[in-house]
Every structure is written in C-alpha cells, then in structure tokens.
Amino acid sequence: MREKSNRLNLLRSIVFAICLMQGNTVLADAYNDGVAAYKRKDYATAFSKFKSATTFSDPLFNLKTRGSSQTYLGLMYENGQGVKRNYETAAKYFYAAAMDGIPVAQTRLGLLFFEGKGVHKDYTLAYMWLNIAARNADKATIRYRDFIEKHMTPQQISESQRMSRECVKSEFQKCD
C-alpha cells in the first residue's frame, strides 16, 4: 500500500513538473511574440501578447519574462504606442516590473518620479530606483542618477542610498 502511495506521489510530481514547463513555454511564447510584434510596430498584437504574459501570478513562473512584459507595457503607455498615453498606468507597470528586478523598469520608474509624471515628484524615490538600476552599470542610468543627485541635499542622498540598500536586501519587498 505504501509503495502504491509513493508511486502516486511520484506521478503527481511528474504531472506537476510537465504542467509547470508548459506554463513557462506559454509565458515565453507570449513574451517573444510580443517583442516581435513590438519591433514590427504592431502595437495591438504586442499589447495583447505582453498582457497575457503578465497574467501568470504563480510565483514559480519566470519573473524576468513577466517583468519584461510589464516593462514593455509601461513603455507603450508612456509613449502612447497602441494605447492612449497614460503616465499613471505606465508607472504601475514599471513599478510591478521594478519589483521583479527589471533594470529598465527601475530606470523608467526613477525618471517618472523625477519628472512627476504619473506619480508624485519625489527626488528621493527617483534616486533610489536609479541607484538600484545602476548596479547593472548602465551608463545612461548612472548619468541620470548623478544628474538627479545635483538637485538633492546630502540628507536626501543618504536616505535614498539607505532605501536602495533596504530594497535590494529585502529582494524588493521593502521599496516604498
């Protein structure tokens, strides 16, 4: 009886693994199809594909693919590509992707905070997100961060750096 139970558990595990792989394939396909459509400037298709790639809420799915899809959606809303320009919606998508650790989204979110587009103007949060994104040594992001630093007090800079460390250390759970 115990052997039969062990076989049944093994079979369940195999079925679960196959379903998980299928889900990742669907997610990757939606993302890749979205990128191809975006490059062709077929924004309606890109939007649909990216949107479907963001609907997987299971934490086992690929966060990078979901986050990258959210970043593209943010860019589409920020630039009015296939959708009406909406900085607030762009900020929401960038925030979600930034929390998944996507540097481009972190940079875009930081710039929205700096400009006060779709979010309240906040140099401390702008610097924090750009400082986090700058860990990837993107020269443009570093230039943006350094430019914003010139508009801040030493106390604001220190607070932003502390917030950056806490955000990264908490694996993006404490970033507000």
Image: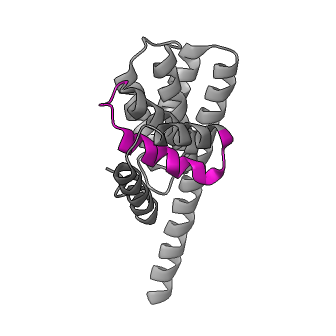
Q: On screen, 108 above or below 159?
A: above
In this view, 122 is above or below 82: below
Compared with 48, 130 (above or below) is below
| Image location (x, y in percent) of residue 78 | 47, 21
Left or right of 77 on screen, residue 39: right
Q: Is residue 101 visible?
A: no
* Nearer to the camera, 127 or 43: 127
Image quadrant assignment for residue 121: top left
Q: Which residue is drawn at 55% across and 37% down?
A: 144
Which of 66 and 173 lies nearest the eye of the viewer?
Answer: 173
Q: Residue 167's spot in the image, x, y percent?
A: 41, 58
For the point 34% across and 25% down, which residue is it?
Answer: 118
| Quadrant occupied by the N terminus | bottom left
| Predominant SS of the magenta segment | helix
Q: Where is residue 139 in the image (x, y as percent from the top left)?
A: 67, 42
| Closer-to-camera residue (173/132) | 132
Note whether 126 is above or below 84 in the view shown. below
Total tally of numbered discs in the picture: 0
Q: Residue furthest bottom?
A: 2
Q: Does the magenta run of residues contain 56? A: no
> Any magenta on residue 122?
yes
Where residue 77 appears, as percent x and y from the top left, is 46, 20
| Residue at (48, 74) in percent of width and height | 9
Left or right for 130, reference 31: left
What range of the chain is rendered magenta?
A: 117-139
Quick one: 29 or 84, which is closer to the camera? 84
At x 45%, y 36%, the residue is 109
Q: Which colour scheme is used?
A: one colour
- Residue 46 visible at all: yes
Position of 142 with respect to 174 (left or right) is: right
